Amino acid sequence: MTEAKKKMLGGAGCGCGGSSAGGDAWWASAPVQKIAQFNPVLALARARRVPFAPWELPLAATFTDPDVTVLPSVAMANGQGRIDQITIVDSVRYTIDQPTAFAGSIFKAQSDYYFALQSGIQVTMDVDGAPRYGVVPFFTPIKDAIEMLGEKWPQGWVLTYNQSIRMAFQSTIPLPSLPTTVTVTFRMWQGVGAEWLVNMTIPQAWAELQKIYANDPDMLADLDMARNSPVAY
């Protein structure tokens, strides 16, 4: 294997690529063997030419009591507690809605816009499932937490079939108007017309990739390297 091929299969670029604001999606354009190093289930979907379609899923919490400043953590709106198949998140945004603030005023939109910038609302964000990990483990201003995710990441944030996202919300200042609803929306991509992706495990994906490229020794060598050498050369 050439040094150029070894560098191509290195892990330095895994999970990176264009920004969520535009540009090519790394997970949709990189070589299959490089994606396999990152996530073999996604590589298998690419190898089988599975089309991916966008899917937007919100996560919302509402402050209704002036004496309650910390809300229990909430899950995504699908209510399943998990995604069920491999999913790529490539954009995250938020809105803050106060329907009774300046109701009927021509300045309501302006007020809502600027309030969202300095609302005093903070969030945490965790991925539930296996593996479970914190994305925003400590309470952080919502503007910083969400906007920093969208500046250059998540381009290729993969959630596996048994994962989901949970968030907690707290208000550090008295909210000027109640109820106040905070909605965080995730744009995701899932394979279309590929029921076999549901509950697909990583060992199963590696086995299927080996079958697909059984007659391609070079590709098998690349896949073997992707599986066993996760550190970039």
Image (cartoon, rainbow, N blue to C red):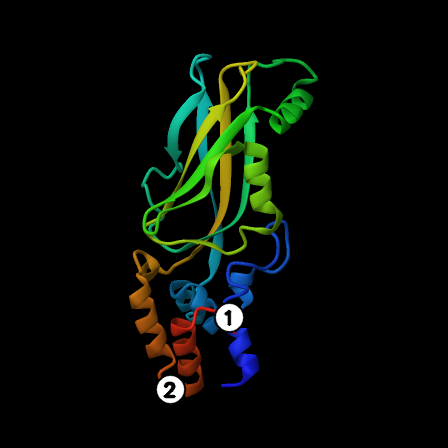
Residue under the image location 34 percent in, 77 percent down:
210
Residue under the image location 56 percent in, 45 percent down:
149
Q: Is residue 50 left or right of residue 129?
A: right
Measured from the top left, where is residue 48 in percent x and y? 41, 70
Measured from the top left, where is residue 172 in percent x and y? 52, 21
Residue hosting label 2? 215
Residue under the image location 55 percent in, 38 percent down:
145
The secondary element bearing badge 2 is classed as loop
Which of discs 1 and 2 lies nearer the camera? The answer is: 1
Residue under the image location 64 percent in, 53 percent down:
22
Picture quadrant of residue 207: bottom left
Nearest the eye: 177 or 229: 229
Circle 1/circle 2 CB separation < 8 Å: no
Residue type, numbered disc 2: Asn
Nearest the eye: 161 or 12: 12
Residue type, numbered disc 1: Ala
Residue hosting label 1? 232
Specify the label residue 103 is tagged with. Answer: none
Residue 56 appearing in the image? yes
Q: Measured along the vertical axis of the image, is residue 188 above or below residue 95?
A: below
Measured from the top left, where is residue 33 in percent x and y? 46, 73
The secondary element bearing badge 1 is classed as loop
Residue 49 appearing in the image? no
